[in-house]
Amino acid sequence: DAGVTQSPTHLIKTRGQQVTLRCSPKSGHDTVSWYQQALGQGPQFIFQYYEEEERQRGNFPDRFSGHQFPNYSSELNVNALLLGDSALYLCASSLKADTQYFGPGTRLTVL
Amino acid sequence: QKEVEQDPGPLSVPEGAIVSLNCTYSNSAFQYFMWYRQYSRKGPELLMYTYSSGNKEDGRFTAQVDKSSKYISLFIRDSQPSDSATYLCAMNSADFNKFYFGSGTKLNVKP
């Protein structure tokens, strides 16, 4: 049973560029959440997708957008990258409210 | 006030010690409580989750929830150097569709 997978592992972009990160949830899970984790900090909730719609959103600007596909996989898009967007981006999947499972993360560096 | 408070540490203990990690929270609606272990530059790994109040034990790990005090704990017995990581608490309510995280406690177990 494959766990949550994310791609790519690492990414280097320059300011102003756009980036797309991908996530496949754990088998049987239908809900995908995205988090941003800066060094030394806990994960910060970006948004959650369920049934291909954004169900909940954290305090992130509209530059952060997402999508969920019929197979429950998801993408996170970030436009007009800023230096402060450099972080570990985590995808987590869940089926019920009791817990969620994380992928290995995508480390984004903005130069 | 943050929804979830967690002492960032670092916490340094000798091998074999009993470790106590704690979080406090403000929202009495939280029902599901989780502990994650995160090694440097990796995704969080689910260690334990509990529902409502009480204790749950799994090997060397014990999770405790005291809803009356809005306080949760993770105990690690016979700590090992391989336990050195950052420990994150998280919690949720079935109504919220969103998980709230502490900022993480960094643990160092010295051989």
Image (tube, rainbow, N blue to C red):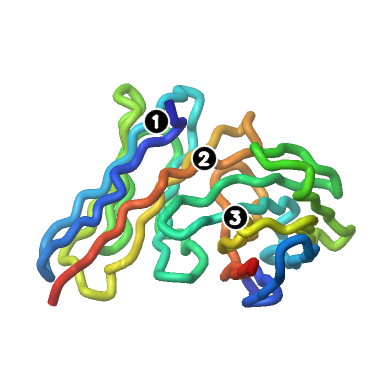
Answer with the quarter of the image where residue B12 lies: bottom left
Disc 1 secondary structure class: strand
Q: Is residue A84 above or below residue A12?
A: above
Q: In this picture, is B47 found above or below A45?
A: below
Q: State the image coordinates of residue A73 (x, y, percent, origin top left).
A: 79, 63
Residue A42: percent from left, percent from top: 46, 50
Judged left or right of residue A63, residue B89 is left
Q: Position of residue B2 (x, y in %)?
A: 44, 31
Q: CA distance from mark 1 to mark 3?
A: 28 Å
Residue A31's spot in the image, x, y percent?
72, 51
Disc 1 target residue: B25
Pair 1/3: label in front: 3
The disc at residue A84 is 3
Q: Residues within 10 Å of mark 1 (few under 14, many from 20)?
A: many
Circle number at residue B100: 2
Q: Residue visible at 59% across and 70% down? A: A107
Which chain letter matches label 2? B
Left or right, A29 with respect to B71, comes to right
Position of the N terminus of chain A by quadrant:
bottom right
Do labels 2 and 1 touch, CB within 8 Å? yes
* Element type where label 3 sits in the image: helix
**Callout 3 amino acid:** Gly
Q: Amino acid at mark 1?
A: Tyr
**For residue B13, which quarter of the picture?**
bottom left
> Mark 2 packing: few (<14 Cα in 10 Å), some, or many (20+)?
many
Q: Amino acid at mark 2?
A: Tyr
